[in-house]
Each structure stands twice: as C-alpha cells, then as structure tokens.
Image (cartoon, helix red, strand yellow):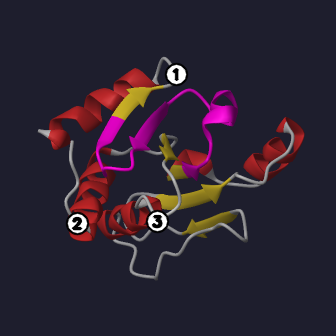
Amino acid sequence: MKIESAQDMQALGEAIAGVARGGDVLILTGELGAGKTTFAQGVARGLGITEPVTSPTFVMSKYYPPVARLGLLHLDVYRVGAADQLLDLWSELDAQSSLTLVEWGIPWAGEFGDCVVEMCIDSEHTVGFSAVSALGELFLGRIEPVLA
C-alpha cells in the first residue's frame, strides 16, 4: 500500500485503531522520518485520544490512557541493549488493555506476547504488514480489510 501524505498515514492509523484489541502489538519498522510517529498520531485519533502524540525516542515509552475502549502504548526500543532491560520495561506497562506500537522492535518481537504484527514502511512510503506470531495472523486478518 502506497502512502501519499501525512494525512494518509494518519488515516491508516485511525483505521487500524478501529480493528485493534487489547494486547495487540504492532511493530513499526522504517527509517527516521518514515512516518512512524505520524501513524501513531492517527492511531491515537482512532482510539479517541486527544492529547498530543510525540515520539518516545528519548523516554522509551509513552502511555496514553483509554478514552473509550483501549489505551495506547508507544515504545521506542532502539536503545534497549538486553532482553532483561526490555522485560523490565514491558512488565511495568498495561499492554492487555492497550494497543501497543513498538518502534525498532523487530529484534525483540518474541518478547511482546502472542499477537504481534510488523508494519514496514520503506523509503518510498510503501507500507506492508506481516504476522510475527501465531495470534498475529488473527490481528493481520483484522487489518487486511482496512487496507482494501
């Protein structure tokens, strides 16, 4: 799927928020400036969250409490050096009642639970999705109709 503008990226995030369930994890893969935070802003809008969404690069995690059905966890694990560091962070978060977005998370995909999908944004702003776990296939099945 080709994304033509920031508005399109936000609209995609909003649409995916509509099919997300608590415990779903979406790993966002793409270079700096690819649109990961823009996508997260759309997800927040789709979840009814009105507070500004910014990149968690320097704080590692940001939590946006639920307004309606789900909260939003936005993680940046680029600087995580070991699995125990990630597990310490992950254990403090309420992932089961939130949709979790993880930037730079593919090396740690196995640590994020059973329902994990990767969203890859390439340099041409083409977006692709793939299941990373068994239950991720179910999440991917909910995502695919919004891509049509």
Q: On screen, 52 above or below 111?
A: below
Q: Amino acid at mark 3?
A: Thr
How much space separates mark 2 and mark 1, taking CA atoms?
A: 30 Å
Q: Is residue 87 magenta?
A: no
What kind of element bears circle 3?
A: helix
The percent coordinates of residue 148 (x first, y second) are: 11, 38
* Rendered residue at 64%/53% (across/down): 94
Q: On screen, 51 above or below 140?
A: below
* Residue that mark 1 sits on: 133
* Residue that mark 3 sits on: 37
Q: Residue furthest left?
A: 148
The percent coordinates of residue 3 (x first, y second) are: 23, 54
Q: Amino acid at mark 2?
A: Ser
Magenta segment, which residues?
Answer: 102-128
**Pair 3/1: label in front:** 3
* Rendered residue at 39%/67% (across/down): 38
Please tell me how crowded label 1 is: few (under 14), some (14-19), or many (20+) other residues with Cα within 10 Å. some
The percent coordinates of residue 74 (x first, y second) are: 57, 60
Q: Is residue 107 magenta?
A: yes
**Residue 139 is at least partly visible in this image:** no
* Rendered residue at 60%/67% (across/down): 63
Indicate the quadrant where residue 13 lies: bottom left
With 83 as the anchor, is 78 left or right in this view? left
Q: Residue furthest top?
A: 134
How much space separates mark 3 and mark 2, taking CA atoms?
A: 13 Å
